[in-house]
Image (cartoon, helix red, strand yellow):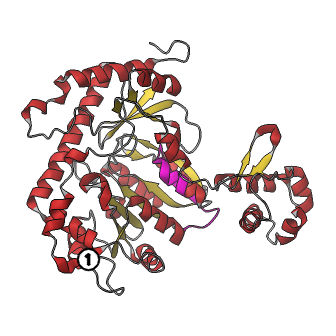
């Protein structure tokens, strides 16, 4: 069986060997749980250097096809990877009185989808397989709201569907990609399942760190993924100056930029996009889940035709388009004055809640990096102790580890602020000043204590 695989390897490079073994796993020549020979034996059989086999093994491990378990050696994984990081970020037992781990919007601050549905004309439902992928009126509204003019725009089934379609259309096994760090866990899961090699790029108070971007480019990165506004989990946003610097670093490189607007922009300033500087290579993915409702499952992709076009064509081999009825509901929400007001109020409420929590933590000696979006990224002395400290008080937070490509240099936990203090809107005076509320102060006390909790005592 092993000899059959050896004979199937035509390309003796690390990528070629990884591809051959990947095909062997797909065909069942290598079965789940089966142990692979030692690296030196494989190198001898294939007549290559052990370093080449080690590099091939690394690619297969990043793709989730094999795993190394100390002295027991390297084995074929028992099952597909799936959203490993995502499940770890949210994995926990029930029974918490307060759940601040979800990264979800407050359902009481979302527009009424049922009311919007009643206002949609009956003739907006598609009656043919030959319809355009995007409702024309929705396309016009989206193009008018885009931070820069775009050659092509389409609508897909949410932000992660957008990323999945992009990866399938434009990336191949072994491709290197630059990814912000910390990062949204499902994107890392997706990139690893596709067999790409994520290269970490730091994200600071002004956006992606230019030196890290350059390092990733020099290592062969073909794509730069990052969130320009309300970065999840850090709550930071890119500045105009940093966008110009990153654009300058990319100017002479054949690199596509994929911006992920999962927060629906930010109320703290005008949105900044690399599309203003590199429109021919910048793709913006704009999700409407947090602003208008997760059940819409819609996101728009806008950018150059060379990038968006293949995604549109590929979808014709699958779902074809996202429901025109659901698109029409989104169109109604985007154009209805009351719905627009509700979304704007919700964004202001989220900003107030996040700022209130950040301020309260700062007063207790815990500084968080950003204040945009619906999360705060809390530095802690020891992640496990911090989570246990909060769990003892009935509070659930998200572990920081799944947000990193590689083991982080420091520990963090993520706190979602969207539902802190219930479903108040800014126009409700009794809940307008969140910083004065006792429950916010109590929560900030608990989080600050958890941030200082150590492995020895679990206390300050």
Determine whether, in the image, residue 258 is placed left or right of residue 136: right
Circle 1: is it few (<14), some (14-19), or many (20+) Cα within 10 Å? many
**Residue at (77% x, 63% y) in the render:** 21
* Residue 406 vertical placement versus 48 (above, below): above
Position above or below: 394 against 112: above
What residue span does the magenta drawing correspond to?
171-190
Above or below for 7 versus 379: below
Q: Secondary structure at mark 1?
A: loop
Indicate the quadrant where residue 47 lies. bottom right
Which of the pair 188/323 is nearer the observer? Answer: 323
Magenta run includes residue 202: no
User: What residue is shown at x 47% (from left), y 46% (from top)?
Assistant: 183
**Residue 196, x across and y down, in percent:** 60, 59
Q: Position of residue 189 (x, y in %)?
A: 54, 52
Furthest toward the front, the residue is: 95
Q: Image point 30% across, 76% down: which residue?
A: 134
Q: Please check the rendered image and state whether residue 186 is part of the magenta-colored stretch, yes or no.
A: yes
Is residue 82 rendered to the left or right of residue 165? right
Residue holding disc 1 = 135
Residue 47 visible? The answer is no
Q: Quadrant of the N terminus?
A: bottom right
The x and y percentages for residue 208 are: 43, 48
Visible residue check, residue 301 = yes
Q: Quadrant of the C terminus?
A: top left
Left/right of residue 259 with respect to residue 345 in the rendered view? right
Residue 389, quarter of picture:
top left
The residue lying toward the viewer, choosing from 174 and 298, is 298
373 relative position to 320: left or right:
left
Q: Position of residue 317 (x, y in %)?
A: 48, 80
Q: Residue at x 51, y 67 (%)?
A: 254
């Amino acid at each position: 069986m092993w000899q059959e695989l050896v004979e199937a390897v035509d390309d003796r490079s690390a990528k070629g060997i990884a591809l051959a073994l990947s095909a062997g796993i797909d065909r069942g020549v290598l079965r789940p749980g089966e142990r692979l020979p030692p690296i030196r034996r494989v190198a001898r059989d294939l007549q290559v250097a052990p370093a080449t086999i080690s590099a091939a093994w690394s690619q297969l491990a990043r793709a989730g096809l094999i795993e190394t378990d100390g002295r027991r050696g390297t084995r074929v994984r028992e099952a597909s990877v799936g959203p490993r990081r995502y499940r770890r970020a949210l994995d926990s037992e029930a029974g918490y009185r307060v759940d601040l781990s979800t990264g979800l919007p407050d359902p009481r601050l979302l527009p009424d989808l049922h009311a919007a549905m009643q206002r949609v004309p009956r003739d907006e439902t598609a009656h043919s397989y030959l319809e355009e992928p995007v409702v024309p009126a929705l396309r016009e509204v989206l193009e008018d709201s885009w931070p820069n003019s775009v050659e092509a725009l389409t609508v897909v089934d949410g932000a992660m569907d957008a990323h999945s379609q992009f990866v399938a259309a434009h990336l191949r096994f072994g491709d290197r990609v630059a990814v912000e760090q910390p990062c949204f866990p499902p994107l890392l899961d997706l990139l690893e399942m596709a067999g790409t090699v994520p290269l970490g790029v730091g994200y600071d108070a002004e956006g992606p760190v230019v030196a890290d971007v350059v390092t990733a480019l020099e290592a062969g990165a073909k794509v730069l993924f990052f969130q320009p506004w309300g970065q999840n989990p850090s709550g930071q946003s890119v500045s105009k100056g940093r966008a110009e610097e990153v654009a300058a670093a990319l100017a002479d490189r054949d690199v596509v930029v994929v911006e992920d607007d999962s927060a629906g922009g930010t109320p703290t300033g005008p949105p900044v996009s690399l599309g203003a500087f590199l429109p021919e290579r910048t793709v913006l993915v704009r999700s409407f889940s947090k602003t208008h409702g997760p059940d819409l499952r819609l996101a728009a992709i806008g950018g150059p035709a060379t990038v968006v076009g293949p995604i549109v064509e590929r979808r014709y081999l699958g779902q074809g388009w996202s429901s025109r009825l659901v698109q029409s509901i989104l169109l109604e929400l985007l154009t209805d004055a009351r719905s627009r007001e509700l979304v704007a109020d919700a964004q202001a409420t989220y900003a107030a809640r996040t700022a209130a929590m950040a301020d309260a933590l700062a007063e207790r000696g815990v500084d968080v990096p950003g204040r945009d979006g619906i999360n705060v990224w809390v530095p802690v002395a020891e992640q496990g102790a911090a989570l246990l400290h909060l769990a003892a008080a009935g509070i659930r937070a998200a572990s920081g580890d799944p947000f990193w490509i590689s083991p982080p240099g420091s520990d963090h936990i993520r706190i979602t602020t969207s539902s802190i203090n219930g479903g108040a809107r800014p126009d409700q005076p009794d809940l307008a000043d969140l910083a004065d509320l006792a429950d916010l102060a109590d929560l900030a006390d608990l989080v600050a204590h958890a941030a200082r909790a150590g492995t020895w005592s679990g206390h300050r």
